[in-house]
Amino acid sequence: MQTPPLSALPDPDAQPEFYDSIPTKRLLAWIVDSVLIGVFCVIALILTLGIGFFFLPLLMLTVGFCYRAATLARGSATWGMALMAVEVRRHDGERLDPLTALLHTLGYSVSMAFVLPQVVSVLLMLLSGRAQGLTDFVLGTAVINRRA
């Protein structure tokens, strides 16, 4: 009797097209998302008549967290990811639900707060078959190319 696979995500050996150029696309998506978050922060500074400047790190953290959680929960991809034609999938192959999107965003935020988790995450993306970051590895998620 054959045991069922641990993950319904595409197999990187049998279906490598799902993981082609994922680290590069993730980097480009991150740059796009960072620019968008910066624009949203400037808008927030204008709306707060500049008072938000005194809380800029907290403002950027909050805006970034809300942006990532909301876009991942809505379409399983941030706007940068959508532009790069990639999306995050759960271990069962489904799109992210709101809770998993929130956990993914929390894991990303914690990883970005410390150097060691950032380094581990980048190394995992470059060396693992599914190009999973640290948060992806913990949650069992993966970023894949969208189906045409």
Image (cartoon, rainbow, N blue to C red):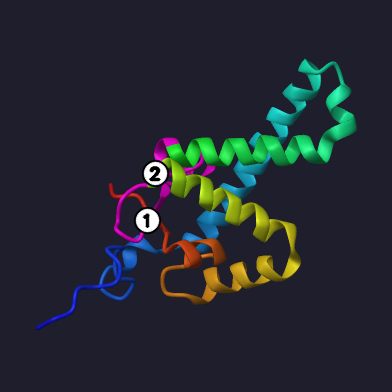
Question: Which disc number belongs to residue 90?
Answer: 1
> Does residue 37 appear in the picture of this structure?
yes
Q: Residue at x 45, y 39 (%)?
A: 73
Three-letter amino acid code at disc 2?
Asp
Under tag 1, what secondary structure? Answer: loop
Q: Please, is residue 87 above or below residue 66 in the view?
A: below
Residue 12, position as x, y percentages in the image: 34, 71
Three-letter amino acid code at disc 1?
Arg
Look at the image and tell me in which quarter the N terminus lies. bottom left
Under tag 2, what secondary structure? Answer: loop
Residue segment shown in magenta: 74-95
The answer to whether 107 appears left or right of 7 in the picture is right
Question: Which disc number belongs to residue 97?
Answer: 2
Residue 24, position as x, y percentages in the image: 54, 60
Q: Residue at x 52, y 51 (%)?
A: 103
> Does residue 132 appear in the picture of this structure?
no
Q: Please, is residue 3 above or below residue 87 in the view?
A: below
Is 91 in the magenta? yes
Q: Residue at x 74, y 63 (%)?
A: 114
Q: Residue at x 39, y 64 (%)?
A: 19
Whether the residues at callouts 1 and 2 have beta carbons within 8 Å, the answer is yes
Q: Please, is residue 118 above or below residue 64 in the view?
A: below
Residue projecting furthest to the right: 54
Q: Nearer the viewer, residue 73 or 79?
A: 73
Is 85 in the magenta? yes
The answer to whether 42 appears left or right of 145 in the picture is right
The answer to whether 48 appears left or right of 76 in the picture is right
Residue projecting furthest to the bottom: 1
